[in-house]
Each structure stands twice: as structure tokens, then as C-alpha cells.
Amino acid sequence: GGGAIYGCRSDRDDEPCVRANNLRKGKAFEFATGGVSAGDIHVGDENGRPFTTNATGRVQNLHADRVDATDIAPIWLHMSAGTDATVFRLGPLRVAASCDANANPTLSANTTASNAVIHAFTWYTGGAGGDHRDADGDFNTGETFVMGFGTSHTGTIVYVDRRVSVSAQLLTQRVGGACVIGGSAQGGPNL
């Protein structure tokens, strides 16, 4: 059923069996299929490299923070007073930030899953007191989970449902008349 089959006897470090060289600026190749797999790359030595490249740009869905279907998201938000924003979205979990008129940040979460579990623990970095422990063992679509992040907090969020797990390390800080939210989040399908 193959449309074309090629064979050659090119030695190592010689010219390849097939080469597409576009002498202008367009694509040199493209593969498309209606199936679930676009193809295979086999090498004689299983420890060999499937391909090499001189390119240094990021390839969507083919980069280190997608290893094992796990996504890693660095977070940096500088929010003006009186604004709202999405901090991150991983799977069914969305974490949002609000910076009120006095530049006091707050974080909340919602989910598109049912019977999820979410925990948040925050430490107040401005001195004693202000630490929060929040949990919802039956977190569902339509609910808002407000966490104890405030003007100067560092904390951890852990979220799980039947399909995915997400964890995040975040900080919130009032800086002048603005709110800063930073950190990282990672998550992916459960094994």
C-alpha cells in the first residue's frame, strides 16, 4: 500500500538517501496523515539519535517541559491595581488572580472536573501570623476556591482529580501600586 519506496547504499557521513532542499524561504518538507501516527524513525542502534538539528527555537509540543505529557509553566504577572488575570491553566484547573484598588492580591481557583481535591498552604513573609491552610475535598465545576495568598505570601497549591495532578509554587507581593504574582506550576495526566 505504500505510494513510494526508496532504497540506497549511502555510507555513514555521506549524502542522505533523500534530501529536500528549498532554494527559497518556504518549507523543505511536510508530512500529513488522517491517522493517529504520522510515522516512525528507526535507527540501527537503539542508543542512536533519531535526528539532529542546528535550530535553537522552541517547537510547540516537542520540548523539555512536555516530557511524559507533563507541562511546566513559569509564571510572572505584574498587575495594575483594579485588574484580574489568569495565573495559569493546566488541564481542568484554572488559577486566577485579582489585584484590588489598593493593590492587594488574592488568588482563587476553579475547575471543570467533578470530585476534585485541592489543598493550599500559604506563609506570610512579612512576619508572624497570616499563614493559611485551605482545602476542599469535593471541589467541583462552578465552585470558587479562594486561597490565603495576600500582600506578601509564598505558598503551595496541590490539585488532583481522576485524570490529572497539578502542583504549583507561587508568591504574591504588593509592589508600590501593583500586584506581582510569580512562581511555577507543573501538571499532567495521572499514571
Image (cartoon, helix red, strand yellow):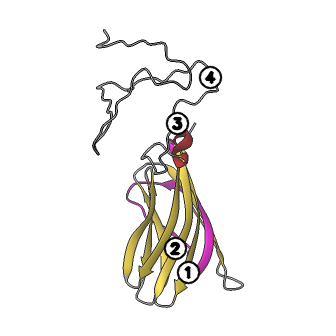
Return the residue at label 3: 52
- The one of 130 and 6 positioned closer to us in this rendering: 6
For marks 2 and 1, the one nearer the N-term is 1
Q: Position of residue 183 (x, y in %)?
A: 57, 66
- Which residue range is magenta in the image? 137-164
Return the residue at label 1: 173
* Mark 4–mark 1 distance (CA, rounded to whole Å): 49 Å
Identify the residue at image location x=48%, y=81%.
179
In which quadrant of the rendered view does residue 184 lie? bottom right
Q: Amino acid at mark 3?
A: Thr
Magenta-span inclusion, residue 153? yes
Q: Name the side, left or right, on which 53 lies relative to 126.
A: left
Q: Position of residue 36 (x, y in %)?
A: 37, 26
Residue most toward the right? 128
Q: Which mark is residue 13?
A: none
Answer yes or no: is residue 105 visible. Answer: yes
Q: Name the side, left or right, on which 186 lies relative to 82.
A: right
Query: Which class describes the residues within 10 Å of circle 3: few (<14), some (14-19), or many (20+)?
Result: few
Return the residue at label 2: 181
For marks 4 and 3, the one nearer the N-term is 4
**Helix, strand or loop under label 2:** strand
Identify the residue at image location x=42%, y=12%.
7
Q: Amino acid at mark 2?
A: Ile
Magenta-span inclusion, residue 7? no
Query: Would you place residue 159 above or below residue 106 in this image?
Result: above
* Mark 3–mark 2 distance (CA, rounded to whole Å): 38 Å
Return the residue at label 4: 46
